[in-house]
Image: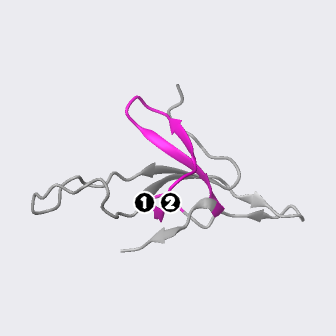
Amino acid sequence: MAKRLIPSLNRVLVEKLVQPKKSAGGILLPETSKQLNSGKVVAVGPGERDRDGKLIPVALKEGDTVLLPEYGGTEVKLAADKEYLLFREHDILGTLVD
């Protein structure tokens, strides 16, 4: 099994962030509570080529926290306990900044 995946073209490998099930005060949060569907960028492809053959680099970088669509992405399992999602750059909704 592969240990590292380098995405091709303009694809981005994202590790989905798991939201806590309890609040800081110890209150159990319901499943239906509105929380952002976010993830951390693990790997980024080199980019896509335009009609002239020039490379258009991906705007995201490793370590960015991004907002993900509710549905989509390709599930990738690299290690026994790690699951990732593979998205095209234009499918990612935005970057979350603290």
Q: Which residue is mark 1?
A: 38
Kindly identify the residue that appears in the image at 59 percent across and 52 percent down. Answer: 87
Residue found at the very far right of the displayed protein: 52
Q: Position of residue 83 (x, y in %)?
A: 44, 39
Q: Which residue is mark 2?
A: 68
Q: Amino acid at mark 2?
A: Leu
Can residue 4 be seen? no
Q: How is the image coloured?
A: one colour
For label 1, the crowd category at 10 Å Cα-Cα, with few meaning under 14, some 14 to 19 and many 20 or more, is many
Toward the viewer: 65 or 46?
Answer: 65
Name which quarter of the figure residue 40 lies in.
bottom left
**Could you tell me which secondary element the residue under label 1 belongs to?**
strand
- Check if residue 82 falls in the magenta segment: yes
The one nearer the camera, 69 or 8, is 69
Image coords of residue 56 (percent x, y): 74, 65
Give the magenta-colored segment's residue range: 61-90
Q: Residue furthest top?
A: 1
Three-letter amino acid code at disc 1?
A: Ser
**Mark 1–mark 2 CB contact (< 8 Å):** yes
Whole-percent x, y for residue 75 in the image? 53, 40
Indicate the quadrant containing the C terminus: top left, top right, bottom left or bottom right: bottom left
Q: Earlier in the sequence, mark 1 or mark 2?
A: 1
Placement of 6 over or under 29, stated as above or below: above
- Residue 70 in the figure: left or right of residue 26: right
